[in-house]
Image: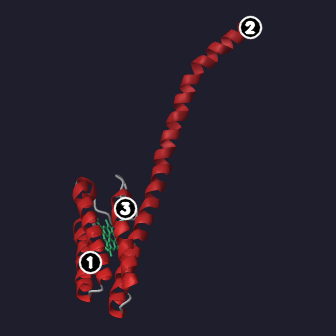
């Protein structure tokens, strides 16, 4: 049954609702900015550092494997570096230059150049895979040297 009191209530809640909703929305946005994005960045920074640490391990493993003639290890490790190189750009979303990171802001000013360095790194790793498959130790040594140079080349422009 509709009474005058009910109608007044309806008007009251109709007037109140939009404001409450917008307040809730504003709170959600503030929470997202304060916690959500920060956490996401911290995760992605930790993940990319882990990826690069694996790279450093792989470079050592490859150098040892050239010496011992364990070419399958070279193939596996160099393929790992190539597939990580392919993912590097996606681990540097905009805004992930703050926090516990040595990424330089230049990455986002010159993202195409950064992507090109990742691509060169991937190509160098794949060249080393081909060398390991051929069994030519001289080509493997040269491949490892070029691969190392492609890591350094990105670091000197984009890493603190
Ligand atoms: C396209 C650019 C790029 C390439 C290619 C690249 N790196 Fe890096 N590397 C970076 C950046 C940027 C950082 C800093 C990441 C951070 O602190 O958030 C980094 C960080 C590192 C770190 C430090 C990780 C840590 O725990 O802080 C190591 C070790 C490393 N790279 C080794 C390598 C090796 C080895 C290669 C090649 C096989 C390589 N990187 C190729 C850009 C690159």
Q: Residue at x 26, y 55 (%)?
A: 111
- Along the viewing direction, whichever of 157 and 151 lies nearer the viewer: 151
Q: Which mark sits nearer the N-terminus, 3 or 2?
A: 2
Residue 102 location, quadrant = bottom left
Ligand 1 resides in the quarter of the picture at bottom left
Residue count near mark 1 (Cα–Cα under 10 Å), binned few <14, some 14–19, many ≥20 = some
Q: Position of residue 133 (x, y in %)?
A: 32, 80
Residue count near mark 3 (Cα–Cα under 10 Å), binned few <14, some 14–19, many ≥20 = some
Check mark 1 vs ligand 1: CB closer than 8 Å? yes or no: yes
Q: Which residue is mark 3?
A: 87
Q: Is residue 33 above or below residue 82?
A: above
> Tell me, what colour scheme is on the image?
secondary structure
Q: Nearer the viewer, mark 3 or mark 2?
A: 3
The tag on residue 148 is 1
**How many labels sit on residues?**
3
Measure how far apart labels 2 and 1 are at the Cα level.
80 Å
């Amino acid at each position: 049954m509709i009474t005058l009191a009910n109608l007044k209530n309806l008007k009251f809640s109709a007037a109140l609702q939009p404001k409450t909703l917008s307040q809730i929305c504003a709170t959600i946005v503030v929470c997202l900015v304060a916690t959500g994005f920060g956490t996401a960045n911290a995760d992605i920074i930790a993940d990319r550092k882990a990826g690069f640490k694996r790279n450093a391990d792989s470079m050592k493993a490859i150098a040892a494997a050239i010496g011992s003639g364990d070419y399958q290890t070279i193939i596996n490790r160099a393929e790992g570096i190539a597939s990580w190189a392919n993912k590097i750009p996606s681990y540097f979303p905009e805004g992930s230059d703050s926090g516990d990171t040595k990424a330089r802001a230049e990455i986002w000013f010159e993202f195409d150049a950064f992507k090109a360095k990742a691509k060169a790194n991937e190509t160098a790793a794949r060249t080393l895979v081909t060398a390991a498959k051929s069994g030519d130790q001289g080509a493997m040594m040269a491949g490892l040297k070029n691969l190392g140079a492609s890591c350094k080349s990105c670091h000197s422009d984009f890493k603190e």
